[in-house]
Amino acid sequence: MAMRQTPLTCSGHTRPVVDLAFSGITPFGYFLISACKDGKPMLRQGDTGDWIGTFLGHKGAVWGATLNTDATKAATAAADFTAKVWDAVSGDEVLTLAHKHIVKTVNFTKDSNFLLTAGNDKLLRIYDLSSPEAAPQEIAGHTSAIKKALWCNDDKQILSAADDKTIRLWDRSSTEVVKTLTFETSVSSMEYVADGEILVITYGKTIAFYDALSLDLIKTVEAPAPINSASLHPDKDFFVAGGEDFKLYKFDYSTKEELESYKGHFGPVHCVRFSPDGELYASGSEDGTLRLWQTAVGKTYGLWKCVLPEDLGTENSEPLYNSPPEIKA
């Protein structure tokens, strides 16, 4: 009898959840931030989904959100033409960075001293957070709105994905394009895995893996439905993806075989990410919820309690957990 996946449901948002990010592992555990069209990004304990706080200040949909490695700072990108930097411990707004159009993406350098932003004005901007009043460094080249921009290669290079159907690798010091990838359709998401320098890209029904330094293709996998986001497990043994059919798919990375699929959301899945310890993955959806899913179903972790087969009745309908199928976090 197969173990039943029981996701933790994190409610609180009132509009679609469009982006999420985990911090690194800190002495206090790890943390999860969510970006939502309700304009109120939320911080949660990563392993349980417990709400910690809401960052209040944006006046429009929040399209992107990120935490620095030690979860002391947060950054958000919004439709109110600003990016904001927050103290993730107190929840206070630290900086508002004015832009000329909707901001879609934010990313800290490893040392948290610089913030990369991009959005509908087609420019990449690098802000020195130690002197925020200084004009940011601007990098032009994309011909449509930029969806995602990420530091890579020890913050010496930048990866950007835009609606011009390209992904571009930029050199930080010269601000020149190193290489461009062109696709037949717009790229829906991009994840950078620093350990191993792997780039995970989704477009249409395709999940593609590239070498992040050379942008050489490693492999592609076709999913049953259009995919909006994918994430590679830290051990690189499998990856998860979610998209337009409301489902989450888990694939074997080496064989490309579909291992599992789960339906829990009541709308398209917009974003999915593995936790830094690989024990769970989080998904955000059009239905306004985040859900946390166990990587190894049946393991005792966070709010999940393992129940051994001998503890179960003979009925297949017997619940496998001491908790209802839908756990509110």
Image: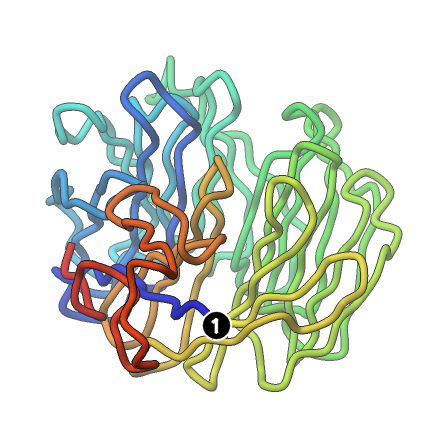
Which residue does the image show at 76% across and 79% down from the upper left?
184
**What residue did someone put label 1 on?**
2
Position of residue 189 measured from the top left corner of the image (x, y, whole percent): 57, 62
In the orientation shown, which residue stands out farthest toward the top? 130
Q: Say left or right for 174 vs 3.
A: right
Is disc 1 surrounded by few (<14), some (14 to 19) or many (20+) residues within 10 Å? few
Q: Say left or right for 150 vs 329.
A: right
Q: How many numbered marks, from 0 up?
A: 1
| Front residue of 91 and 114 | 91
SS assignment at label 1: loop
Q: Is residue 118 above or below residue 152?
A: below
**Image quarter of the C terminus:** bottom left
Which residue does the image show at 40% across and 55% down from the upper left?
298
Q: Say left or right for 259 vs 299.
A: right
Res. 84 image quadrant:
top left
Res 116 visible: yes
| Front residue of 29 and 33 | 29
Figure colour scheme:
rainbow
| Front residue of 138 and 83 | 83
Which residue does the image show at 69% across and 68% down from the upper left?
207
Res 101 visible: no
Position of residue 296 measured from the top left corner of the image (x, y, whole percent): 49, 53
Which residue type does callout 1 highlight? Answer: Ala
Position of residue 90 measured from the top left corner of the image (x, y, whole percent): 12, 24
Res. 61 image quadrant:
bottom left
Q: Say left or right for 269 vs 28.
A: right
Which residue does the image show at 17% across and 61% down from the upper left?
323
| Front residue of 38 and 288 | 288
Position of residue 328 measured from the top left corner of the image (x, y, whole percent): 14, 60
Res. 260 image quadrant:
bottom right
